[in-house]
Image (cartoon, rainbow, N blue to C red):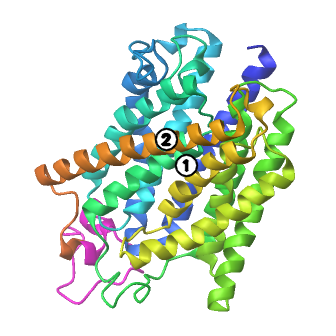
């Protein structure tokens, strides 16, 4: 890399890091104030833990010398200060992606999970699930060590609709099935007991921060500052905006008022959907992909509620639903010459579908087994009393004077 490319990758890494602040604001705003501290600190803690784990183990599994295209076997715990600037900045960019994949789970199971158990889950995702999945498609990005088996077949996922977002969504789905819904969420049937968020303005700010970060997420995935970057950025913005209009319009048609949750998540769904293909489609096609992405978020949310699956912030429809769509849209609409796989249209669609299936089996299957067994060893969920009091108190011993405490003897500072 020349100095301009290095600067671009550092800037892109910083933009992706900003997405952690976006997730923090989004999740804090969409949950109740009695859990705000817990939600916030999880977003910082999972990034710190996943960075350490990815440096020690994950980067090597993802980009090391390939073992049959399945996982890497070297590059563990590198001394990056003594390595080439290109490798150091590549690691910096990739560790931000790992952090984003892990943080998706935070919002899914917010307001009911023990802090220590969540760190265990973060360790599994950052150290095993995400890097091995990433190796299958992105192993060759580092320029050495070989390529992944899916990439060899022609699977394309430019910036991670599946590798990052669907992996996080599949793992989040497995985790929420193990942990279960929040108390009171479905006491009167699906769609009857929606829990009121604490601050939609804060959640909206989170969505805007994520939108800004996505410019680095997609634009930086070129790994160089070249002539394709402006078009990628435009497609990213168009996809996100049309996704918001799509999901917001659908919710308005059904409820006769704008559902702020759906407008926000439609924005994110549109962004997720164009992430895999933003480099290989026209602006009009990016708009179409974002439009369908927003619709998928809306309908996927209704399906989860009907099944009484309690996703606290709607992360599964956004990252899993729109992620699958974006991956398939790459095969459906991506310019074949730009994709550069040598496959015909039907062949490209088939290998994209194979990738979706492979990532679903790997991530959801292994996550469900590990999380189920982990929950047997040390219960993931706080007890009912702790959940009612709020995780600020029960997990961290902190509460604000403005927080309402359920009836019972008052808590002294020494008891809180």
In the image, the segment drawn in magenta is 387-416
> Relative to 106, is 53 above or below?
above
Residue drawn at x 75%, y 28% is 8
- Residue count near mark 2 (Cα–Cα under 10 Å), binned few <14, some 14–19, many ≥20: many
Q: Nearer the viewer, mark 1 or mark 2?
A: 2
Viewer can see residue 41: no
- Nearest the viewer among 127 and 383 is 127
- Residue count near mark 1 (Cα–Cα under 10 Å), binned few <14, some 14–19, many ≥20: many
> Relative to 199, is 223 above or below?
above
Residue with the mark numbered 2: 99
Magenta stretch: includes residue 187: no
The secondary structure type at the circle numbered 2 is: helix
Q: Quadrant of the N terminus?
A: top right
Residue 31, x across and y down, in percent: 45, 72
Residue drawn at x 80%, y 58% is 287
Residue sticking out furthest to the left: 377
- Nearest the viewer among 309 and 203 is 309
Residue drawn at x 38%, y 50% is 171
Magenta stretch: includes residue 411: yes
Residue with the mark numbered 1: 20
Residue drawn at x 19%, y 75% is 384
- Nearest the viewer among 44 and 317 is 317
The secondary structure type at the circle numbered 1 is: helix
Q: Residue 3 occupies which quadrant of the picture? A: top right
Q: Tell me which label, 1 or 2, sits earlier in the chain.
A: 1
> Could you tell me if the residues under marks 1 and 2 are in contact, i.e. CB atoms within 8 Å?
yes
Q: Residue 225 occupies which quadrant of the picture? A: top right
> Relative to 176, is 129 above or below?
above
Left or right: residue 81 versus residue 185 is: right
Residue 288, x across and y down, in percent: 77, 59
Q: Main secondary structure of the magenta part?
A: loop
């Amino acid at each position: 890399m020349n100095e301009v490319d290095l600067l671009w990758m550092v800037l892109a890494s910083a933009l992706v890091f900003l997405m952690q602040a976006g997730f923090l604001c989004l999740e804090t705003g969409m949950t109740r104030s009695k859990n705000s501290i817990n939600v916030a600190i999880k977003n910082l803690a999972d990034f710190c833990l996943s960075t350490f784990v990815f440096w020690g183990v994950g980067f090597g599994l993802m980009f090391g010398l390939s073992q049959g295209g399945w996982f890497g076997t070297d590059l563990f715990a590198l001394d990056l200060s003594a390595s080439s600037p290109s490798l150091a900045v590549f690691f910096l960019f990739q560790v931000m992606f790992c952090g984003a994949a892990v943080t998706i789970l935070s919002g899914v199971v917010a307001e009911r999970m023990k802090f220590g158990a969540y760190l265990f889950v973060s360790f599994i995702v950052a150290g095993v699930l995400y890097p091995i999945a990433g190796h299958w498609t992105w192993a060759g990005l580092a320029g050495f060590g070989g390529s992944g088996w899916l990439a060899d077949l022609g699977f394309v996922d430019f910036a991670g609709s599946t590798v990052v977002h669907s992996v996080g969504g599949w793992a989040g789905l497995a985790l929420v099935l193990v942990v279960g819904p929040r108390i009171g969420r479905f006491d009167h049937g699906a769609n009857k007991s929606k829990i009121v968020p604490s601050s939609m303005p804060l959640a909206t700010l989170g969505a805007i921060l994520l939108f800004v970060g996505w410019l680095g997420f997609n634009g930086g995935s070129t790994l160089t500052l070249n002539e394709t970057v402006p078009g990628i950025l435009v497609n990213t913005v168009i996809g996100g905006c049309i996704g918001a209009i799509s999901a917001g319009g659908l919710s308005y048609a059904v409820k006769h008022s704008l559902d702020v949750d759906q407008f926000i998540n439609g924005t994110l769904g549109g962004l997720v959907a164009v992430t895999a293909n933003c480099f290989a489609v026209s602006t009009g096609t990016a708009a179409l992909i974002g439009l369908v992405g927003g619709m998928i978020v809306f309908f996927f949310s209704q399906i989860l509620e009907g099944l009484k699956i309690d996703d606290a912030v709607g992360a599964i429809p956004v990252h899993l639903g729109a992620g699958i769509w974006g991956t398939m849209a790459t095969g459906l609409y991506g310019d074949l010459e730009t994709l550069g796989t040598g496959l015909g249209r039907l062949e490209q669609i088939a290998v994209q579908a194979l990738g979706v299936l492979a990532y679903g089996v790997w991530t959801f299957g292994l996550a469900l087994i590990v999380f189920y067994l982990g929950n047997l060893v040390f219960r993931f969920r706080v007890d009912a009393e702790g959940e009612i009091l709020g995780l600020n108190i029960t997990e961290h011993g902190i509460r604000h004077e403005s927080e309402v405490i359920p009836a019972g003897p008052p808590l002294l500072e020494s008891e809180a």
